[in-house]
Image (cartoon, grey):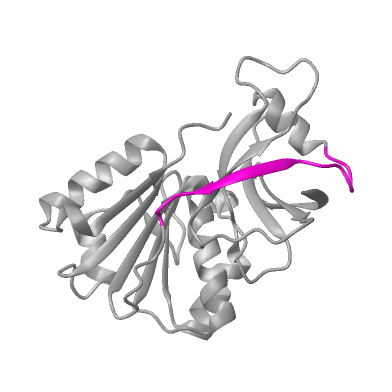
Amino acid sequence: LFFKEKKQIAQNTFEFTFTKKEPIPYISGQYMQWSLPHHKEDVRGTKRYFTIASSPYDEDIKLGVKILDNGSTFKKELADLQKGDTLLVNSVRGDFVLPTDTTKAVVCVAGGIGITPFISMLRTLLHTKEKRNLSLFYFVNQREDIAYKDVLQEVKDTLGITTVVSLSKETVEGYESGMLTKEMLGVHIKSITDTYFYISGPPMMVSAYKDLLISLGVKRAYIVTDFFPGLE
């Protein structure tokens, strides 16, 4: 891939855009191995697995990444890419993809940068104009952490998709507060029976929300999980 541009989409969060030399077939929600060799790499190495944030219909490949000051040398090298610089990708993988049965109700639950696979899905729905019974719950610390506001607003306006953003460290009118609960689901979801739940985010969040859904009677087979092991 060839680096094209970088833009900030939230606090400490950036979207990187790359042009591709040849077609890369993938399904929204899948990830690839990204390789960025560089000098004086730290023990975390030169390779990462990142979910693709673009839609397969997009001309370019997009990657959403959170970068902190104490991050890895890989992230620092990524942040310093110049237009035309190259990055290697391979091994498209993952089964964190929407059900092929478009009549199934789907609830997407994202924590932090775990929003990226859902952004790929939403961008695909915007392109195909496919109507799905889909809702998105997005959990961040504060408003400055909300990424992809433009995509979330567009799917709400054009496709009628329910988007619920919840803040854990501040209370703001128009947003939910705190973590996912039975009560929060009850306000926004008519029924969890025969509903697929997709959860993406930090491991502890994914595990806790999976346990919550099982305790509410959601079938294990209807809970699909993905997790982001760290910010390195």
Residue at image position (50%, 53%) is 30
In-image side of 34 versus 175 (left or right): right
Residue 202 found in image quarter? top left
Instruction: Return the x and y of residue 48 as percentages of the image width and height.
Output: 59, 34
x then y, percent, for residue 103: 30, 81
Residue 24 spot, x, y in % from top left: 65, 58
Residue drawn at the location 62% of the way across and 61% of the way down? 54
Relative to 153, is 13 on the left or the right? right
Q: Is residue 110 left or right of residue 82?
A: left
Q: Is residue 196 magenta?
A: no
Give the prevailing secondary structure in the magenta stretch. Answer: loop
Placement of the C terminus among the 4 image quadrants: top right
Residue 26 screen position, x and y as percent: 56, 60
Q: Image height check: is 192 above or below 211?
A: below
Query: Considering depth in this image, is 87 or 133 the residue closer to the camera?
Result: 87
Residue sitting at 10 percent across and 57 percent down?
A: 217
Observer-nearest residue: 18 or 186?
Answer: 18
Q: Which residues are magenta?
A: 81-96
Q: 123 above or below 171?
A: below
In magenta stretch: residue 84: yes
Q: Residue at x 60, y 20 (%)?
A: 44
Instruction: Specify whether 75 is left or right of 135.
Output: right
Count numbered badges in the picture: 0
